[in-house]
């Protein structure tokens, strides 16, 4: 009974937190601006210049960039929250801040929601830009599907299959096929997102994003208005 109460209270806390995130698009915008500062500092140091498109130095040659890169990995978590805020704002028509609700109206600012979804994806993708995410996704999906098949297939079907091929080998074949298909399918889409992420973290672009996030975020949070009033409905 104690465990049940604890789990219930724990779930209420989590649910309350995500509800707060959904209602705090303005704060998520400001936090995105702060994250853009880490992109600006890390990429400038890594590339050796504010405007260079490619790095000419090894990361091991500077310690500051390691610290900034460590901060950028917070984007994996922050990106999820930022995406959640944008998506829920669109779906539930939630104002980006209480001040915005009081000054402008009790409805979402669609421009802010769409921007948060895009910048949230970028924050999530940037720290893992060098990983073969499509391969990892393929392996995970293949493992889950193969596990489910092994559980739900009736014994009678297993015995029938055993007369043709060893069921274990069949599961291995299924695992390999699914992993390859998912990896190849995801490679194009994930690769595109990673390229976009790298472009947006280029110092001049990151600087513009940083300024915009801070200006738009504080306008929504404190002023109660948006510098862009796009609303789709």
Image: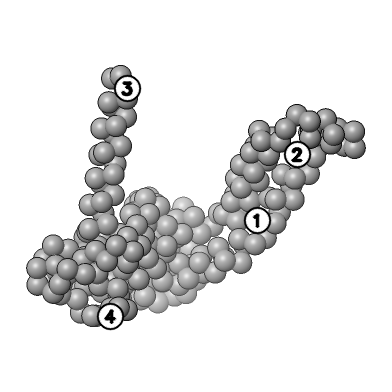
Mark 3 to mark 1 CA distance (whole Å)? 39 Å
Q: Quadrant of residue 181?
A: bottom right
- The reply to whether dot 3 and dot 1 touch (C-beta < 8 Å) is no
Mark 2 crowdedness (10 Å alpha carbons): few <14, some 14-19, many ≥20: some
Q: Position of residue 160 (x, y in %)?
A: 85, 34
Q: Is residue 148 above or below residue 176?
A: above
Left or right of residue 167, residue 5 in this image: left
Describe the element under mark 1 as helix, strand or loop: helix
Q: Which residue is mark 4?
A: 230
* Nearer-the-camera pick, 112 or 164: 164
Mark 2 to mark 1 CA distance (whole Å)? 16 Å
Q: Is residue 43 visible?
A: no
Left or right of residue 189, residue 142 in this image: right
Mark 4 to mark 2 CA distance (whole Å)? 51 Å
Q: Is residue 106 above or below residue 157?
A: below
Identify which residue is drawn at 33% across, 64% down.
91
Q: Quadrant of residue 189?
A: bottom right
Mark 3 crowdedness (10 Å alpha carbons): few <14, some 14-19, many ≥20: few
Q: Residue furthest top?
A: 1
Q: Which residue is mark 3?
A: 3
* Comes first in the chain, label 2 or label 1: 2
Q: Is residue 88 visible?
A: yes
Disc on res. 149: none
Of the two numbered discs 4 and 1 in the rendering, the one whose residue sits closer to the viewer: 4
* Comes first in the chain, label 4 or label 3: 3
Mark 4 to mark 3 CA distance (whole Å)? 47 Å
* Nearer-the-camera pick, 13 or 125: 13
Q: Which residue is mark 2?
A: 171
Mark 1 crowdedness (10 Å alpha carbons): few <14, some 14-19, many ≥20: some
Q: Quadrant of the C terminus?
A: bottom left
Disc on res. 182: 1
- The reply to whether dot 2 and dot 3 touch (C-beta < 8 Å) is no
């Amino acid at each position: 009974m104690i465990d049940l109460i604890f789990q219930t209270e724990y779930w209420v806390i989590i649910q309350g937190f995500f509800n707060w995130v959904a209602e705090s698009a303005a704060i998520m915008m400001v936090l995105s601006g702060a994250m853009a500062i880490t992109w600006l500092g890390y990429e400038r140091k890594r590339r050796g210049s504010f405007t260079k498109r490619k790095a000419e130095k090894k990361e091991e040659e500077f310690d500051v960039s390691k610290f900034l890169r460590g901060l950028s990995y917070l984007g994996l978590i922050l990106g999820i929250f930022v995406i959640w805020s944008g998506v829920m704002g669109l779906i539930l028509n939630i104002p980006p801040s209480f001040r915005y609700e009081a000054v402008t109206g009790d409805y979402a600012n669609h421009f802010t929601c769409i921007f948060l979804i895009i910048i949230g994806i970028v924050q999530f993708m940037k720290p893992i830009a060098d990983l073969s995410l499509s391969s990892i996704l393929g392996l995970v999906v293949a493992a889950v599907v193969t596990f489910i098949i092994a559980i739900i297939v009736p014994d009678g079907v297993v015995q029938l299959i055993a007369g043709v091929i060893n069921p274990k080998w069949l599961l291995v074949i299924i695992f390999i096929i699914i992993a390859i298909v998912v990896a190849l399918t995801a490679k194009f889409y994930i690769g595109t997102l990673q390229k976009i992420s790298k472009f947006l973290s280029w110092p001049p672009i990151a600087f513009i994003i940083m300024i915009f996030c801070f200006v738009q975020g504080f306008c929504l949070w404190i002023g109660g208005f948006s510098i862009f009033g796009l609303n789709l409905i």
